[in-house]
Image (cartoon, rainbow, N blue to C red):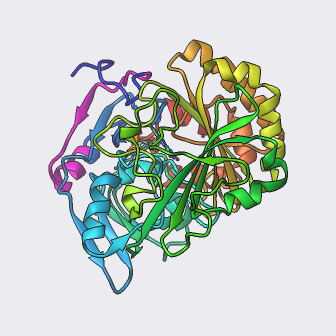
Amino acid sequence: MDAGSRKNWAGNVAFRAADLSRPATVGQLQALVAGTDRIRALGTGHSFSDIADTPGTQVSVLGLPPEVEIDSAASVARVAACLTYAELAVRLDEKGFALRNLASLPHISVAGACATATHGSGLTNPSLAAAVTGLEMVAADGDLVTVGREHDWFDAAPVHLGNLGVVTSTTLEVVPTFEISQRVYEDLPLQVLDDHFADIMAGGYSVSLFTDWRAPRLTQVWIKQREGDTSKVTEAPWFTAAPAQAQRHPVPGGSPEACTQQLGVPGPWYDRLPHFRPGFRPSAGTELQSEYLLPIASAVPVLHAVAEIADRVAPVLQICEIRVVAADRLWLSPCYLQDSVGIHFTWILNPDEVLPVVTLVERQLAPFGARPHWGKLFATSQQALRDSYPRLPDFLRLMAHHDPAGKFRNAFTDRYLGR
Ligand SMILES: Cc1cc2nc3c(=O)[nH]c(=O)nc-3n(C[C@H](O)[C@H](O)[C@H](O)COP(=O)(O)OP(=O)(O)OC[C@H]3O[C@@H](n4cnc5c(N)ncnc54)[C@H](O)[C@@H]3O)c2cc1C
């Protein structure tokens, strides 16, 4: 395929890479990396920017053998980088294991999702990358290296944005399999959050709030409860929100069939924690996305700051999702050392109309120390990123050490991280 004709999932980025290589073995991948001047890994292409692009060769690991090795005694699984969460989840569950949490969709590759600190929701659930205990990757010189928690720079590795090497496998913490049931509640006045944000977010194992900012109300509240803890998932109204009487989709006009089972019916973790089912196009399907992570203590003033510009946000918005994510220790994680609230925007697929509003949102959120999601659209300056990611200079030193010739660098790296 020609450069420019391959696109990301959303279709808003035409990759400039001259070619896409798909090695079938780790040995072939090593030879490719060693012999190429500029190279970058592509996962399942679900990021909304040029983060996975390169002026040289893009490499997909989706052709590598789909191995999963579970070490029950250590409660870890070594997962081939070609696997998506949908593929991995079924294989873990068959053996009686689970991951603590998942994102809103299981269609994304484990390697690509961890690289950008992808997350779900839950006061006790950190980003998916926080489950990483080890990585195997092909380094710039073509050597296959293993990075584990014994390395003093390990906390730089799981959220690497594709800058440290091409990951061939990720070792993840696993837990015994569990069941979840979820219910959707509808129509909660936004002002209820002023006094009850913490109670509402503590209302389940994973809670997501949705609003379209067209009125001061939450259109939907999704509560995912672990089985055995059914205190909140009932058919009674919750605060003043009424439980939905049928399956729902969070995006107006979306087909409920594309969503995981609701209505309080228990089921396996992997079939309830994501909102969207594999085999269907997730979310709106035609969209752009942005998301900002901020200190959880600022959640209420942050929502008021967005409410002030609701008349600018609503016309280009499909839906906004509010989640919480527990702190981690990963240098480039937006939740680095900080329990966070995530404000996510599913925009219309029109960059010209959306980008000015993204800039406006960032201006409103800047006083609260907003950290952008690396895999979504943002307009944050290099300086502001340095201010909000204290370990960014250390990460750049590490990049220079491991990739002195800048083989894995790309325009995204130059634009946002600098040197
Ligand atoms: C519909 C939709 C819903 C989403 N929902 C959520 C959500 O609920 N929560 C959330 O946090 N995010 C969400 N996202 C964002 C998404 O999780 C991230 O963009 C994620 O990085 C996508 O994974 P990917 O495999 O497609 O990675 P890609 O977009 O292909 O790549 C992302 C980065 O990872 C690097 N990379 C990929 N594979 C490798 C590898 N093997 N070795 C080294 N580097 C690699 C790439 O170079 C790039 O820098 C959503 C995106 C979409 C489209």
- Vertical comparison of 215 with 147: above or below: above
Residue at 78 percent across and 45 percent down: it is: 369
**Where in the figure is residue 143, as x and y percent of width and height?**
30, 59
303 vs 292, left or right, is right
Q: Give the position of the N terminus as an image quadrant.
A: top left
Asked if the magenta segment contains residue 258, the reply would be: no
Q: Which residues are magenta?
A: 12-32
Residue projecting furthest to the bottom: 73
* Residue toward you, 275 or 41: 275
* Residue toward you, 226 or 133: 226
Say whether residue 158 is visible: no
Say whether residue 409 is visible: yes
Quadrant in which residue 360 is drawn: top right
Residue at 35 percent across and 54 percent down: it is: 85
Residue at 33 percent across and 40 percent down: it is: 44
**Where in the figure is residue 336, as x and y percent of width and height?**
66, 58
278 vs 333, left or right, is left
Quadrant in which residue 203 is drawn: bottom right
Q: Give the position of the C terminus as an image quadrant.
A: top right
* Residue toward you, 79 or 60: 79
Dividing the image into four quarters, tell me where ligand 1 lies: top left
Asked if the magenta segment contains residue 30, the reply would be: yes
* Residue toward you, 207 or 102: 207
Residue projecting furthest to the top: 352
Disc count in the image?
0
**Where in the figure is residue 225, as x and y percent of width and height?**
53, 64
Residue at 73 percent across and 31 percent down: it is: 362
